[in-house]
Amino acid sequence: MYNVLSETEDGPISTEHCDWLYGIFGHETSCTRYWTCWNGTATEQLCIGGLLYNENAHSCDWPENVDGCQKHPLCNDDANGNVPLGKSCNRYWQCQGGYPRLQRCPAMLVFDRRSLRCVVPPTEDCDVPTTPLPFEGDLEQGKVW
């Protein structure tokens, strides 16, 4: 006779990122991400709006309710502000609730280090984005694409 309620010695069936075949599990390296697992297939999810994944509640939650996730030092000055990315003219960090997200300015705009937003160039550090002109020889031979 087989007892359905007895536990096996092998434990739960798991796959990469999934402790069980079905469920919601915390991300290994990020407090803003988590995994949803369906039949052992893991799909990475993102908590939005400055929320963090709460392992105890198995859902996104306010940072003050999530133990073990410290805010990123990049966002110490302004938990919801923008931070320049090195010398890049079109990429920057956008802090949301103390956690940085890499962003890109829309086409033809550059990131202004003074106003900390995307603006019409030129700025003190960035010129107008340009497309290089073709060589004269290419124009004469019809090689412009």
Image: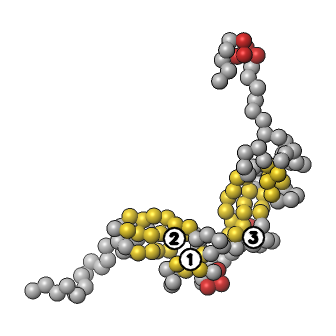
Quarter where residue 71 is shown: bottom right
> Sequence-wise, which precedes: disc 1 or disc 2?
2
Q: Residues within 10 Å of mark 2 (few under 14, many from 20)?
A: many
Q: Secondary structure at mark 1?
A: strand
Left or right, residue 59 beside residue 3: right
- Say which amino acid is labelled 1: Cys
- Say which amino acid is labelled 2: Tyr
Outermost residue, right direction?
A: 124
Label 3 sits on residue: 80
> Are the two marked residues, 1 and 2, in contact with CB atoms closer than 8 angstroms?
yes
Residue that appears at 60% across and 75% down: 52
> Sequence-wise, which precedes: disc 3 or disc 2?
2
**Distance CA(mark 1)–CA(mark 2):** 9 Å
> Are the two marked residues, 3 and 2, in contact with CB atoms closer than 8 angstroms?
no
Label 2 sits on residue: 34
Mark linked to residue 60: 1
Q: Residues within 10 Å of mark 1 (few under 14, many from 20)?
A: many
> Sequence-wise, which precedes: disc 3 or disc 1?
1
Q: Secondary structure at mark 3?
A: loop
Quarter where residue 141 is shown: top right
**Distance CA(mark 3)–CA(mark 2):** 22 Å
The answer to whether 82 is drawn above or below residue 64 in the figure is: above
Q: Quick one: quadrant of the N terminus?
A: bottom left
